[in-house]
């Protein structure tokens, strides 16, 4: 089966509540829907969320690289020749969201062609994941109220708390309010998006220990090499590399260099193919993984849960699967449902999802 065309469609859907964190804020999902067409009539889909503040991609760059470079390299290629396709994509540096969307859309086609869900093709370990909800910057009481609402409405009991503000006390107060409101039954962990210096983060770690935080992610920049290494040595819980380790080579450097002891895997930036490589590498090196959220839509979230549920090691911890709840609308015909604090995989061929064409017409920005 051959690739005949790749569409890159820009669209914008506002958030009902913006997500704010140390490296940026997102008010509108300005993403790119990628559709890979084949000569057998099957069409694979995936979402590309540009994150200029982390990887330098924009909606325009995702569309540009797909239309000007990747389409010309891939049209005519065999859908199943995954290594050859990746070798061609690899000739261009960077552009992780654009490459990942193409990769996942091709897996979608493969699943449809074999009449099997992608999650089964990847590994088929389990049919659902526990959900972790990410709480963006707000005042302590508002964040505690949001967490209580998520617990009462969806049964979510795991929360990732965005930290990295100054003074450090601001975020300590938030974590304390969350612990007081949710009690010991809730799992809480923190993500600093490189907002603090290593010494600010070290002071915060001591308080986080008392509050029972279970993971610490990107509290200071990994480029502050020695400071970060000292911080990781002091950390009593797994220290997660997210944006500082986005390729398997970076993961190796990060784990061997003492920049981190655990890794966040985001299908939005490593697709399924490179997420597999990172996951197997982490298993081999004895590092835990967390399925992260790149502020994903429902389509992005379907991909995260399809991958996370496929393996024992990626489904052990709760996955970050709920940020789509803050979007005012979505493109899927059938919405995702979180119940009992879990999200189920789609048990249909491919990714098992379809785009609502009326909604796409409403939100697309190229017509
Ligand atoms: C995270 O884990 O850092 C914030 C920006 C982004 O790309 O992902 C998020 C969440
Ligand atoms: Mg992070």
Image: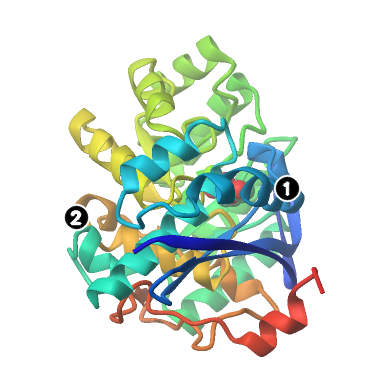
Up-down relation of residue 326 to residue 256 (above or below): below
Label 2, on which residue?
Answer: 312
Q: Position of residue 73 (x, y in %)?
A: 52, 44
Instruction: Name the residue rendered at 46%, 46% in the picture.
Output: 211
Q: Quadrant of the N terminus?
A: bottom left
Up-down relation of residue 31 to residue 211 (above or below): below
Other-residue count near label 1 (Cα within 10 Å), few / some / many at <14 / 14–19 / ≥20: many
Q: Is residue 346 left or right of residue 59?
A: left
Q: Secondary structure at mark 1?
A: loop
Q: Position of residue 157 (x, y in %)?
A: 41, 68
Q: Nearer the viewer, residue 233 or 76?
A: 76
Label 1, on which residue?
Answer: 58
In 3D space, how far apart are the residues under numbered discs 1 and 2 (Cα atoms)?
34 Å
Instruction: Name the residue rendered at 82%, 74% in the picture.
Output: 367
Which quadrant of the picture is home to ligand 2? Answer: top right
Q: Is residue 302 left or right of residue 366?
A: left
Which quadrant of the structure image shows residue 234? top left
Which quadrant of the structure image shows residue 348? bottom left
Instruction: Name the residue rendered at 27%, 35% in the picture.
Output: 282
Other-residue count near label 2 (Cα within 10 Å), few / some / many at <14 / 14–19 / ≥20: few
Instruction: Name the residue rendered at 67%, 46% in the picture.
Output: 68
Q: Secondary structure at mark 2?
A: helix
- Counting every numbered tag in the picture gives 2
């Amino acid at each position: 089966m051959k690739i005949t065309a790749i569409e890159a469609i820009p669209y914008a859907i506002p958030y009902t509540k913006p997500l704010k964190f140390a490296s940026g804020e997102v008010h509108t999902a300005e993403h790119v829907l990628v559709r890979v067409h084949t000569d057998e009539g099957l069409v694979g889909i995936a979402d590309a969320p540009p994150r200029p503040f982390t990887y330098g991609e924009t909606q325009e760059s995702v569309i540009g690289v797909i239309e000007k470079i990747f389409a010309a390299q891939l049209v005519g290629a065999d859908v199943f020749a995954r290594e050859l396709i990746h070798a061609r994509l690899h000739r261009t540096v960077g552009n992780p969201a654009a490459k990942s969307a193409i990769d996942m859309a091709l897996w979608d086609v493969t699943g449809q062609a074999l009449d099997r869900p992608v999650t089964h093709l990847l590994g088929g370990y389990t049919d659902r994941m526990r959900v972790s909800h990410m709480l963006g910057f707000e005042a302590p009481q508002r964040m505690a109220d949001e967490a209580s609402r998520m617990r009462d409405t969806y049964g979510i009991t795991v929360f990732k708390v965005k930290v990295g503000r100054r003074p450090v006390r601001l975020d300590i107060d938030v974590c304390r309010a969350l612990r007081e409101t949710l009690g010991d039954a809730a799992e809480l962990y923190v993500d600093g998006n490189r907002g603090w210096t290593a010494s600010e983060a070290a002071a915060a770690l001591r308080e986080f220990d008392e509050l029972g935080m279970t993971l610490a992610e990107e509290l200071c920049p990994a480029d502050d090499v020695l400071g970060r290494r000292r911080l990781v040595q002091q950390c009593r819980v797994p220290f997660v590399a997210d944006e500082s380790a986005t390729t398997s080579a970076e993961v190796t450097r990060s784990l061997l260099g003492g920049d981190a002891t655990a890794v966040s895997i985001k299908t939005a930036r490593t697709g399924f193919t490179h997420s597999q490589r990172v996951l197997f590498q982490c298993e081999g090196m004895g590092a835990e993984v967390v399925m992260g959220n790149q502020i994903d839509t429902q389509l992005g979230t379907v991909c995260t849960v399809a991958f996370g549920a496929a393996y024992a090691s990626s489904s052990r911890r709760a996955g970050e699967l709920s940020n789509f709840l803050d979007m005012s609308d979505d493109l899927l015909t059938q919405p995702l449902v979180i119940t009992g604090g879990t999200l189920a995989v789609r048990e249909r061929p491919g990714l098992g999802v379809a785009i609502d064409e009326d909604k796409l017409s409403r939100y697309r920005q190229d017509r």
